[in-house]
Image (tube, helix red, strand yellow):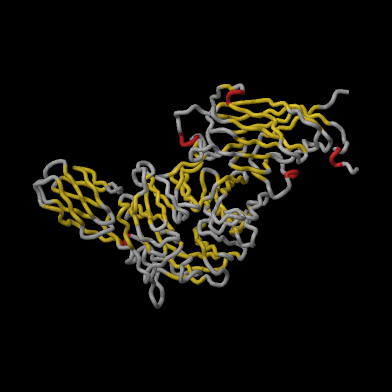
Amino acid sequence: MARVKTEKVFKTWGLGTVNAVQPELVPSGATSFSRNFIANKDRLELLGGRKLVGSVVDSNSPCLGLHSIQKVDGDWVLFRKDRTKLQAINVDKDDEWLDSLTTLQDDTILYFSNSFTPAGRQVWANGVDGLFKIYPSALEDPVNLTNRSKNYDGYLLIEGSRAYVVGMEKDPTGLRYSRVDNDDNYVLVSGESVGSSGSTHYTKTLAHTQVFGIEIISGTKSLRDDKNGNLIGDGTGTINYATGELDVTFTDTTIAAVTVSYLYEDPLNHGLADFTYSSGDRLAGEGNVLRQDSIGTKSTCCFSFEGMIFTMQDTGSWKVKIESNDTSLTNVPFNQNVSCASPFGFAQIDDGVVYIDTSEENKPVLKKLSYNALSDKVEPKLLSEQFSFEGFKFDKAPMVRFNGFVIFSGASELSETNDTTFFYNIETGGIFAADNGYNMFVVCGNRLFGGDSASPNVYQLFDQRTDLGSAIAGEVRLGNMMYDTEQLKKAKKIYVEGFIEPAQSFILESSQDRETWKEVGRISFADITVKATDETVGSVLFGDDLYGGSSLLPAPSFFKKALKIRMKKFERQMLRIRSSGIGHLSITQIKVSDIRKKGTKTLKKYKQR
């Protein structure tokens, strides 16, 4: 009778890395270990590398703040705290960071939130040094709004025309929120003189600062601001919204007096920087303080979800529901077993909020707050049942949602700084791990940036062919597989399919019954049969935009390679892939072929002598 030959095909990868059980229990579609490989349902892919933003900073201090805002013209501005400085850079145009604030306290975090109102796009920064407002078009002129009788240091959230602060140094378990920012806070100035007629060029410092809605008129000629600091119309010019400095050049000599009309705001007077409220009966629209003292010892962050404000504490959590009349509210404990130690350890996704839960000591887990499918109750749901984070610390963990993934960093057991980054695939639920850790994450359109955990440096992440000029060392292991039979067996060939770039290569290795790894074969672009492909091969993280969207290099090419196996009988086999080159590498299918059963005898190494 002819021997029965079987094969085992691996072509789905969405289950991620399963490390909460022994490799023998890892199912098909999952890996038992990953390093710098991530996956969608149809492929394992080597992660892209980093690119430094600006010049390297030689310091052991971490990045203490990272934020972004998009200007009206579409450009993105990055902000970071580098030790005692708040710095900014236009990542689309500038090569170096610009100092915005100096002489800040070292070793303290600066918290950010954006405001989008009729007064313009603004970045707000808050910390022990004070509360500041920055216009993206006037980076060197931050507005100091610090008044500790009206506002507070701590984690800052601007949501629904109101600012919220928790985790204050002098009030660690209070929640404070500001007055409502609305049109009543804006003041109109009409016809302020800029100059008499007879010239084309005029300069002026307006009578007020924090201005917007600029219109300059001379007879029938006029210019307006473009909400990005420029004056357009019958001439050109600039306006500094923070300082009120005006510089305008008309296309022709003016024949009538030049005047300007504008609006200005004072956020310390019934605005986002004003947290005051009446000493008697509090009125609608005023600020407030809510006590959240009975569970944790410190609040770490707050966020908005489905019309409620949730506060995370070092132990437990609270929820606040402010009614539309702003005179009634509920402020109650949410869940004793929902907590987050990091002020940046959460990310909002379509159906909830993902966060690192640290309520159980020494057993951090990934969870999601979302509605129960059978009720209108918000509940936590475990997302990391098959992945163990034990041994990792997440008290400084940042988290961000980016292109179908929730990405977060943590510190391994012996590290004082975040040194590992994890990827949670929102669609498949798979989790993967990668080298390097970050203190902060921020998204600029279709780009992701990370603030280093061991230096103030900021990097553009995961879209480079190299990691700061070096090859990316990737490794992935499948489970310890018995190929559907507990009998002894042999396999003759392994077929590997995927996409590869010319400078990339990888090694396929096998471990039989937990013995040492042995090389099955090396695959490079030069020794495979390459066929042209019409399909666009992008990145798991970046879609079709592979490695920064470069069109100067050819797209990765499809490959299929057969490797012969010359090994003794085995019960179980584990396969390992290690990258050894530079550029794109993705594995779409692994097929172990010509598997032949060799009986039920016990391997000699297991026999009792």
Indicate whether 196 appears above or below 93: below
In the rendered image, the quadrant that contains the C terminus is top right
In the rendered image, the quadrant that contains the N terminus is top right
Indicate whether 9 appears above or below 30: above
Is 67 positioned to the left or the right of 523 in the image? left
Residue that extends furthest to the bottom in the rendered view of this protein: 280
**Viewer-closest of 176 and 599:** 599
Is 239 positioned to the left or the right of 327 in the image? left
Residue 200: percent from left, percent from top: 13, 45
Point 32% across, 57% down: residue: 142
Point 50% across, 61% down: residue: 301
Quarter assignment of residue 363: bottom right
**Viewer-closest of 159 and 12:** 12
The reply to whether residue 369 is visible in this rendering is no
Count of marks, rendered view:
0
Is 561 positioned to the left or the right of 346 in the image? right
Residue 526: percent from left, percent from top: 58, 23
Point 62% across, 39% down: residue: 475
Residue 238: percent from left, percent from top: 24, 48
Residue 121: percent from left, percent from top: 35, 52
**Viewer-closest of 291 and 365:** 365
Point 44% across, 43% down: residue: 52
The reply to whether residue 121 is visible in this rendering is yes
Quarter assignment of residue 550: top left
Is 300 positioned to the left or the right of 282 in the image? right
